[in-house]
Image (cartoon, rainbow, N blue to C red):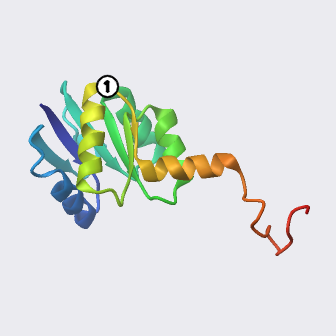
Amino acid sequence: MFDVCVVVAEPLARRGVRQLIDGNDRVRSLRTVDAVSEVAAGAGTVVVLVDPPEQVLRWSCARHPTLVMVPESAKGATLDAIRAGARSVVSTATERTQLGIALDVAAAGGFYLCPTLSARLRACAAGPDPARPAAGGARGPA
């Protein structure tokens, strides 16, 4: 079992993340706060950050197992979270099951990247599709 502290300033987002985590039988306690400065120091606390600024991300990852929620389209935010040392990175559109897996992995000290973000990164790494028109409507060499 582990504790979870969700850090998100926006009340509606805070409520949504809390609802996704509520009922997880592996979570001993669930706390939500407005700012990372309110995270209590304690062993076994997984910090959940929702689309955090880079300095908050680095601060949390250096001190706590951190799960980061980023928008699906935010390739840069996904890479920033991975580079900062986040234990789990999921989309803000993630479902309860995926979030539960990501929390478990973060608490155990592993690394988890949700399938949606993983697929986006793979697609970006593969480069542009040669069958698609390039910017300006021109096609690649035939």
Per the image, the residue denoted by label 1 is: 109
Graded by Cα atoms within 10 Å as few (under 14), some (14 to 19) or many (20 or more), the crowding at tag 1 reads some
As drawn, the residue found furthest toward the right would be: 141
| Residue 64 percent across, percent down from the top left | 30, 30
Q: Residue 60: where, in percent of width, then height? A: 35, 35
Label 1 sits on what residue type? Answer: Gly
Query: Relative to 59, is 100 on the left or the right?
Result: left
Give me the residue at 18% from left, 40% from top: 4
Q: What is the total number of numbered labels drawn onto the structure image?
A: 1
Q: Is 53 or 130 nearer to us in this picture?
A: 130
- Where residue 119 appears, as percent x and y from the top left, is 52, 50
- Which residue lies at the image location 52% right of the left edge and 34% below the top edge? 83
Q: Is residue 45 above or below residue 22?
A: above
Instruction: Determine whether 116 is above or below 81 in the image.
Output: below
Residue 5 placement (x, y as % from top left): 20, 42
Q: Secondary structure at mark 1?
A: loop
Q: Nearer the viewer, residue 27 or 97?
A: 97
**Residue in view at x 38 percent, y 27 percent:** 62
Indicate whether 64 appears above or below 79.
above
